[in-house]
Image (tube, rainbow, N blue to C red):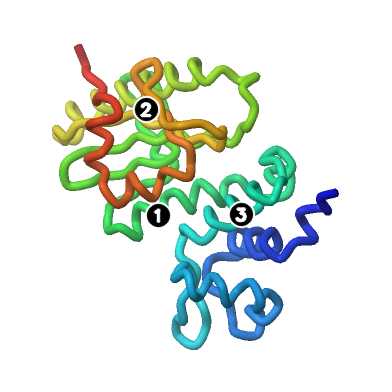
Amino acid sequence: MLKDPSETVEFKLLKRLLENGLVISRGEAMEYWEFFRNLLTRGVIFEYEGCFKALPECCLLLLQKLVESGFCLETLFKSVNWRGFERIIAEIFRFHGFKVREHFRFHVGKVFREIDVLVETPLLLISADCKQWVKRNYSLKTACKLQFERSRLLLKYLTEKKNILKEVYPLVVTFLDSEAMFMNNCIVVPVWKIRNIAEAPEILKTMGKPVSLF
């Protein structure tokens, strides 16, 4: 029988990273040391100015390990800060050298919208909506439709007000256990795939298509 996830070293470390940041003192690291050494070996934690620093991917690795151990995402999300995961997704793109804006607010006329994570790469823009729900009782099709409309409005804003002419790809990042897909003009990506996109954003061109004003 599975114990409470809060009793596991993986969960305690995950919660610590999300709520207090990615830098950990050597003294604090000793609380997780047996598991910590494995993360050091895997290269997702490294020595940093007399302390240790976790890469953003470390949080995704910890979450995935908990899920593989049998804990359901719904249980895990009741005990962690989801906003922390939005920051982690943003940091993964920053780590790969891209300009990132979190909670980017804009308006076209009297219509105001917000993009959870806006990523600018040399060739394209990624308009990402991060969904923490883990059940399909909230319509994924509806989420995609709304994100497509937000991204379409974003394109209009960037083109007309900022003279930015890059393609905009709408993206929904979810913790649903599914493969990447293209739905209602929007690319749906499980969070485990974010690192792949950050390493090669042009892969989005093979997964879907950018929004258009026409």
Q: Examine the rendered structure and indicate whether residue 186 appears above or below residue 66.
A: above
Q: Position of residue 103 (x, y in %)?
A: 44, 41
Tell me which numbered mark, 1 or 2, is placed earlier along the sequence: 1
Q: Secondary structure at mark 1?
A: helix
Q: What residue is rendered at 45% in x and 81% in y?
A: 48
Q: Is residue 114 visible?
A: no
Distance CA(mark 3)–CA(mark 2): 25 Å
Place residue 207 in its image quadrant.
top left
Amino acid, disc 3: Lys
Q: Examine the rendered structure and indicate whether residue 3 appears above or below residue 53.
A: above
Q: Position of residue 19 (x, y in %)?
A: 63, 59
Would you name the residue on which mark 2 appears?
Answer: 187
Image mark for residue 65: 3
Q: Secondary structure at mark 3?
A: helix
Mark 3 or 1, closer to the camera: 3
Would you name the residue on which mark 1 appears?
Answer: 92
Neighbor class of circle 2 (other Cα within 10 Å; few <14, some 14-19, many 20+) is many
Q: Nearer the viewer, residue 6 or 143?
A: 6
Tell me which numbered mark, 3 or 2, is placed earlier along the sequence: 3
Tell me which numbered mark, 3 or 1, is placed earlier along the sequence: 3
Distance CA(mark 1)–CA(mark 2): 18 Å
Mark 3 or 2, closer to the camera: 3
Left or right: where 124 falls relative to 5? left
Amino acid, disc 1: Ile
The furthest residue to the bottom? 50
